Structures are given as structure tokens and as C-alpha cells.
Amino acid sequence: MNEFQNIKQWAEDDRPREKLMLKGKSALSDAELIAILLRSGSRKETAVDLAKRILNHVSDNLVELSKLDLKELMKFNGIGEAKALSIIAALELGKRRRESEIMLKEKIKGSKDVFEYFHANLSDSHYEEFWVLLLNRANKIIKKEMISEGGITGTVADPKRIFKVAIDHHATSIILCHNHPSGNLKPSEADIKLTKQLKEAGNLLDIAILDHIIVGEDSFFSFADEGLM
């Protein structure tokens, strides 16, 4: 007799799919939700056990899980290309849903809204990226635009490109945003100098620089909130 039971042999209350139908999505653990994506485990472990093993590798952190690419996921015994792609797709949908929630709001009201909007793009990036958020006169989002992508320790933001994008889309104000993959949210001297230069240039062009947000894994730094604008 097998040392473990497959999902069909479990008590109905313990099967992830059946549990979802009976008790709703909030009743399931992260491992159980991932097990539904996997559909099956291997000869040596159930889908839930496989999901737990993957989560344990990233310290039960879904943000860290979303950083794993196709090849990294396929290194786990029991994870083939199809299962790896299912995990990647599900996590990407979760990030896009968070961004969509911000888009549904009438306007950007503060630094937290900006953080929530960019968190999906930047929280799991291994490299530093510089973005701008273009706003109209009512502080409604026109669009976001990536200005540059650099290495782990920095990237270069070209002021000419930033203001060209703003002018091309008739933005009346912009918010600067970049990430610190290291997790250290303290702005560098270069960050402070660039922000000052862009604010002064924006005043000449009548395009207001409202804030500069530095995004970390689950928190942020706002130049405006800290009185640096």
C-alpha cells in the first residue's frame, strides 16, 4: 500500500478544490491554492506537499515566489514546464489585479496610492527601474512609462526623456518612482539631486513634480511625505 494518499483519497474537507467549493477561497492556505494550480504532485508527495516545499524555499513569501523564473521553478522535482507556467501566470494576474484596483480610483490622492500602483511592477524586480506616472489636471492617471532599467545598484534617468513623455501625453503633473532591490529605502545623494533638478526643470515647463516614491518589497519612501520636495 502507498505510504501517502492521493487527493482523491483524502477526506473531502481536506481536498483543495473541494475545500474551495465548500468553504470559499479565503479558507485555503497559500499551499492549497498553489496545489490547485499544480493539479497533481508526484509519486512521492501530494500536490499540497509539493506546494509547501516550494513555499518553504522562499520562506513562505509570495513576493519572493514571484521572482522565480521558469527555469528556477522547474528545478523543483515534480514541477514541469506546464506547472511552472501556471504558477507564473497566476502570480502575474494577482499583480495586475492590484494595479487595476488603483486605476479604478478617480484620482491619485497620496503616496500610498502611488505605491500600490507601482508595487506590482517593482516589488519583485531584481534590477532598479525608473518610472514616471503621468497625471492630468485632476490628478487622474494618464499612463505610466518606464524611463530606464539598470543594474542591481542603480539606473540612469534622462530628464529630457522624462519631460518629452510628459509633454507628448499632455500631462500637467508627474510622479517619479523607482525601486531599490536591496530593500534599503533611504534615498541616495543621486536620488535627492535628480529630484531637485527635475522639480526645478518642471517649474520652468509648468509641469509639477508632485512626489518621488522609492519602492521596496512591502514598503516605500515618499519624498513629499518626508518634506524633500
Image (cartoon, rainbow, N blue to C red):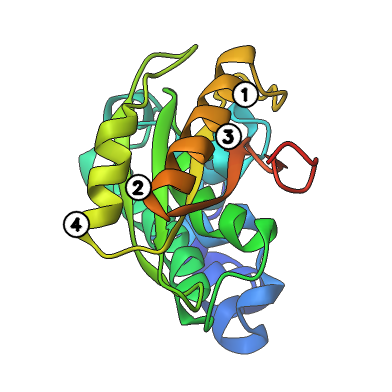
**What is the distance, in whole Å, between disc 3 and disc 2 at their CAs?**
17 Å
**Label 2 to label 1, Cα distance in Å?**
36 Å
* Residue at point 60%, 77% (across, down): 25
Quote the CA–CA distance across marks 1 and 4: 26 Å
Residue under circle 2?
88
Q: Between tags 3 and 1, which lies in front?
A: 1
Q: Nearer the viewer, residue 68 or 190?
A: 190
Residue under pointer 1: 192
Of helix, strand and loop, which one carries label 3?
helix
Residue 161: x and y in percent read: 25, 36
Q: Residue furthest front?
A: 204
**Residue 168 shows which numbered tag?**
4
Q: Which residue is mark 3?
A: 53
Name the secondary structure under disc 1: helix
Q: At numbered mark 2, what does the secondary structure look like: helix, strand or loop?
A: helix
Vertical position of residue 137 compared to residue 143: above or below: below
> Which of the 4 quarters of the picture holds residue 22?
bottom right
Mark 2 or mark 1, whichever is nearer to me = 1
What's the residue type where badge 2 is placed? Answer: Ile
Q: Earlier in the sequence, mark 2 or mark 4?
A: 2
Snapshot quadrant of residue 16:
bottom right
Upstream in sequence: badge 3 or badge 4: 3
Nearer the viewer's eye, disc 3 or disc 2?
A: 2
Q: Nearer the viewer, mark 2 or mark 4?
A: 4
Query: Which amino acid, by three-letter code, is at mark 1?
Result: Ile
Q: Residues within 10 Å of mark 1 (few under 14, many from 20)?
A: some
Given this view, does label 3 or label 4 mark the residue nearer the observer?
4
Question: Along the line of sight, which residue is nearer the eye, 125 or 32?
Answer: 125
Query: Quick one: label 1 or label 4, which is nearer the N terminus?
Result: 4
> Alpha-carbon distance for marks 3 and 4?
49 Å
Q: Nearer the viewer, residue 172 or 149?
A: 172
Residue at 43 percent across and 37 percent down: it is 201
